[in-house]
Image (cartoon, grey):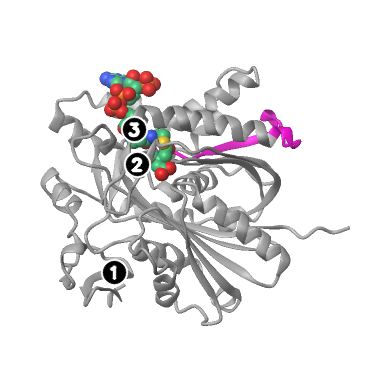
Amino acid sequence: MHTLSIGIDKIGFYIPQYYVELGLIAARDGTNPSKYHRGLGQERFAVAPPDEDIVTMAANAAYPLLDATDLQHIDTVLLATETGIDQSKAAAIYVHRLLALRANCRAVELKQACYSATAGLQLAASYVRANPTRRVLLIASDISRYDLHTPAEATQGAAAVAMVIAANPRIATLDAPSGCYTADVMDFWRPNYRHTPLVDGKYSTEVYLEAVKHAYHAYHAQGGLNYAQFAQYCYHLPFNKMGQKAHEYLCKVNQIDNDIKKLEESMRYNRIIGNSYTASLYLSLCSALDHRDDLANTSVALASYGSGCVAEFFAMTILPSYLSQRQKAHHQALIAQRIALDYASYEQFWHRPELTQTDTLSVGQYNRSRYRFTGVFNHQRQYCINPDS
Ligand code: HMG
């Protein structure tokens, strides 16, 4: 019997046009930059300017992917984020309007720390399996922002990854089984009254490893592929060293020498973009797809983690057409166009206007991409399309 394949038909990311070199933070604090470059495996982090938020990043990620067929068949928009802009209204609705998607569509926001895009992927795949002519636009969009002068500051970042989930996809099929793990822990959380998260940094790294370990064993208990059958591993990467440590564990339980080669190409983008929470794992997938030309018909392992916590270990098969579908040139152009911030500009951007204190706010222009956040009028967020985009 022919089984329908479901998975990622298109995938692409967007990043803000500004970044901070970690050497700048090291110089400010008198820290050896090697702590960041080698100790965390990070070089730079992306910084969103005041006229950029999860909505503009999400729309900027999705816009270059969508053609007339997508616009006709997408009837569901799922937006995964932990940088919510509203306690009630889904950010997906703003994105739906900016992208001019059809009105007969559902739009919803998903939350579970960095994990929720994976929940979105599984939900989207089940939906498309039951309704093979439909497509789902799944977007992960986040700005990771920690308090200045804390150890977590070096692990900030920002990005959005957009995916079209469809039947007979051209990038990758989503494969069963999937290993999940949930435990109620307080490693990282952001109460509604805070703009930055509370984090127990060292503990969070331990919980991450423990959760990925349980998810991996749950995957295996259901007859998943063995270590050697995967050509590539992609992890949630709050910083690259975290993924390396999780991979070390997998190598250890499989009694093989630490095999960094199966990880390396998935870490290139994350090293210079930083933590993008829900988008991080899928940015790591983009990195592997863009930097490896030999993935056709191979299996890729993905390990998703979101604090609090939920983890999932699952697999995809990469399709030969990924080579013509990947957005490598676009991604590399976004990276090449970025501007390095000096320390004063970084602090200025970090202190984003606090919108709770005012019902009206006008934001200056820093963001030159298609979609821009222009401010708040009467407590309502305003967006525009840059006329020169
Ligand atoms: P820290 O205290 O600044 O760093 O915090 P450290 O002192 O532990 O050093 C970090 C590493 O650098 C260590 O390596 C040092 O040895 C090494 P390790 O021993 O761990 O292998 N080091 C050096 N290496 C080379 N040359 C040197 C040097 N000096 C030191 N000169 C921490 C680090 C990650 C805790 C902090 O940045 C933090 O709190 N970050 C935020 C939390 C986080 O990212 N947690 C990750 C797991 S939780 C997760 O992934 C979920 C999350 O994405 C959010 C969500 O799901 O919602 C965060």
Residue 84 visible here: yes
Dot 2 falls on a residue whose secondary structure is: helix
- Assign the N terminus to one quadrant of the image: bottom right
Tell me: is circle 1 under 8 Å from ligand 1.
no
Give the Cα separation between the discs numbered 3 and 1.
Answer: 34 Å
Q: In the image, ligand 1 is in what quadrant? A: top left
Q: Are the two marked residues, 3 and 2, in contact with CB atoms closer than 8 angstroms? A: no
Residue 109 in the image: state x and y as whole percent: 46, 63
Identify the mark nearer the N-term, 3 or 1.
Answer: 3
Residue 156 in the image: state x and y as whole percent: 30, 43
The three-letter code of the residue at mark 1 reads Arg
Tell me: is circle 3 under 8 Å from ligand 1.
yes
**Which tag is nearer the camera, tag 3 or tag 2?**
3
The three-letter code of the residue at mark 3 reads Asp
Residue 283 in the image: state x and y as whole percent: 46, 48
The residue tagged 2 is: 272
The answer to whether 228 appears left or right of 194 in the picture is: right
Give the Cα separation between the discs numbered 2 and 1.
Answer: 23 Å
Q: Which mark is residue 89?
A: none
The residue tagged 1 is: 372
> Residue visible at 59% across and 17% down?
257
The residue tagged 3 is: 200
Identify the mark nearer the N-term, 2 or 1.
Answer: 2
Residue 32 in the image: state x and y as whole percent: 22, 23
95, 81: nearer the viewer: 81
> Residue visible at 63% across and 36% down?
231
**Which tag is nearer the camera, tag 2 or tag 1?**
1
